[in-house]
Amino acid sequence: MDRIKERYVDVKNPINKNQISKISLEPDAVDCIVFWSKNPKPLLGKLRFLDEYAFYFQFTINPYDSDIETGLPPKKEIIETFKMLSDKVGRQRVIWRYDPVLLNSRYTTAYHIDKFNEFACQLKNYTEKVIFSFIDFYRKISANVKVHGITEITTDEKNTLAGNFSGIAKENSFLIDTCAEDIDLSKFDIGRGKCIDGALIAKITGRDFSVKKDKNQRTECGCAASVDIGEYNSCTNGCIYCYANCGKNIRLVC
């Protein structure tokens, strides 16, 4: 919010820390702001500062306990935050993310199907879309993967999860997409998602919005070209599958 007030933000290149870009946050320079969050509750009382901007949220609610997501509030509280946010900004502008899906002896396919259904039933009047993905085994998380017994997800397991998730989504009137997955799940009526979605931005703003795919993202990613103003090693949620934090000694970005 301080950066919104100042109308600019300085962004470090994650590869070259000495390279800093000054990004304008003047309203006429910003088509849309896309927030990713697992707990946007602190922002609820400050949404008025965004009145000059188009924006929407990618809001993650996963089924994991504190063994996997170490710094989050209880799920009941997070779901209530989702509902409050949706009531404030509209269900079109709050997308539920269920990702990444990971499997081990505790978090099985049956567990995920049960929890996905439980959450969907609670969120069905508060969003129009759900996006899911399967865990990527980044080198940074290899130690956590081993400690927690997280296994590779087979094609059969992916199909089982996808088929059930799709059925549950339909029952609750959600659209359902994947995020940056190379597996074709169209037989389950599951699309390839665009987290930074030109069509949604056009719908929210009421303006034509034609932007090419972001060439800096993975081949499977369908996002429109954008500027990422986030910073690595700044989140305190402590999720063990996260590629954006290097360790426990996390500093907050001021």
Image: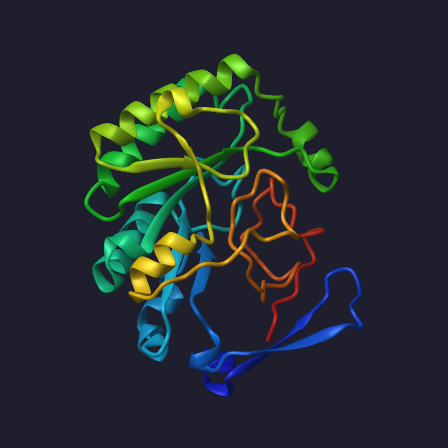
User: Quick check: 154 above or below 7?
Assistant: above
Between 143 and 102, the residue placed more toward the observer is 102
From the image, which quarter does the C terminus lie in? Answer: bottom right
Residue 246 location, x and y as percent?
A: 71, 51
User: Quick check: 148 above or below 196?
Assistant: above
In this view, the residue farthest toward the top is: 156
Between 179 and 164, the residue placed more toward the observer is 179
Quadrant hosting residue 202: bottom left
Q: Residue at x 26, y 63 (%)?
A: 89
Side (left or right) of 120 relative to 191:
left
Residue 178 location, x and y as percent?
A: 46, 35
Q: Residue at x 28, y 31 (%)?
A: 169
Q: How is the image coloured?
A: rainbow
Between 158 and 109, the residue placed more toward the observer is 158
Number of numbered discs visible in the structure rendering:
0
User: Quick check: 220 above or below 117?
Assistant: below
Regarding residue 247, the answer to whether it shows in the image is yes
From the image, which quarter does the N terminus lie in? Answer: bottom left
Residue 159 location, x and y as percent?
A: 46, 17
Q: Residue at x 46, y 46 (%)?
A: 194
In this view, the residue farthest toward the bottom is: 6
Residue 167 location, x and y as percent?
A: 29, 23
Regarding residue 111, the answer to whether it shows in the image is no
